[in-house]
Amino acid sequence: MEIKAKLNHLRIAPRKVRLIADFIRNISIKEAKTKLKFIPNRAAEPVLKLLKSAIANAQNNFNLKEDDLYIKKIMINQDTPYKRWFPISRGRSFPILKRACHIELVLGAKEGAKLEKIKQETEKPTVGKEEKIEKTQKIEQKPKFKISKTPEKIKSKGFRGFTKKIFRRKSV
């Protein structure tokens, strides 16, 4: 069974995050946690947070213990970069790409671990037919817009406004 967690639009370059990902790939959760806590790189904190999220998914959804898990796969994909411009001499500009990445973490369970899928029961509120009919009647009764002037007045005033605009212009 695979337990997945994703982090999208992380504003750190994928090249820097891949260094951390290679460091923790295919090891147990405890080792990965201790390594990530003591790595000085900025990318270690979001990866550790994602790892904790994946562990919580495993505990809540599959009743797995933290000791039975290992990092099966971690993928870092490039996100669309933000494009900015840096002004340089003589009115020119230099492009700057501010890169971002997506992280996908997959945890695997060791062979002796028990996998139990927990069914989450969600109650969907049922709406009766009577309530639907009342809602549609209320919507039909409300007018969509108010007509305050008759069309004849609108046409004559529009024409008068047009001639005013022409004669108000400055001569060329």
Image: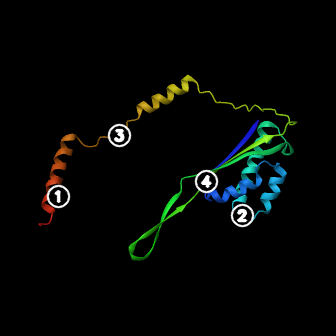
Q: Which residue is mark 3?
A: 145
Q: Earlier in the sequence, mark 3 or mark 2?
A: 2
* Quarter of the rendering occupied by the C terminus: bottom left
Q: In terms of secondary structure, where does tag 1 sit?
A: helix
Between disc 1 and disc 3, the foreground one is 1
Instruction: Name, please, the residue furthest toward the top.
Output: 129
Q: Would residue 122 appear left or right of 149 to someone viewing this image?
A: right
Q: Which residue is mark 1?
A: 165
Residue visible at 80% across and 53% down in the picture: 32
Q: In terms of secondary structure, where does tag 2 sit?
A: loop
Residue visible at 15% across and 63% down in the picture: 169
**Which disc is residue 101 wearing?**
4
- Name the kind of residue labelled 3 in the image: Phe
| Above or below 60: residue 137 | above
Q: In terms of secondary structure, where does tag 3 sit?
A: loop
In the rendered image, which quarter is residue 128 located in?
A: top right
In the rendered image, which quarter is residue 108 located in?
A: top right
Q: Residues within 10 Å of mark 2 (few under 14, many from 20)?
A: few
Relative image position of residue 39 (x, y in whole percent): 77, 62
Q: Are marks 1 and 3 in contact (CB under 8 Å)?
A: no
- Name the kind of residue labelled 4 in the image: Cys
Between disc 3 and disc 4, the foreground one is 4
Q: Residues within 10 Å of mark 1 (few under 14, many from 20)?
A: few
- Name the kind of residue labelled 2 in the image: Asn
| Above or below 23: residue 124 | above
Q: Which residue is mark 2?
A: 41
Relative image position of residue 42 (x, y in whole percent): 69, 63
Residue visible at 40% across and 71% down in the picture: 92
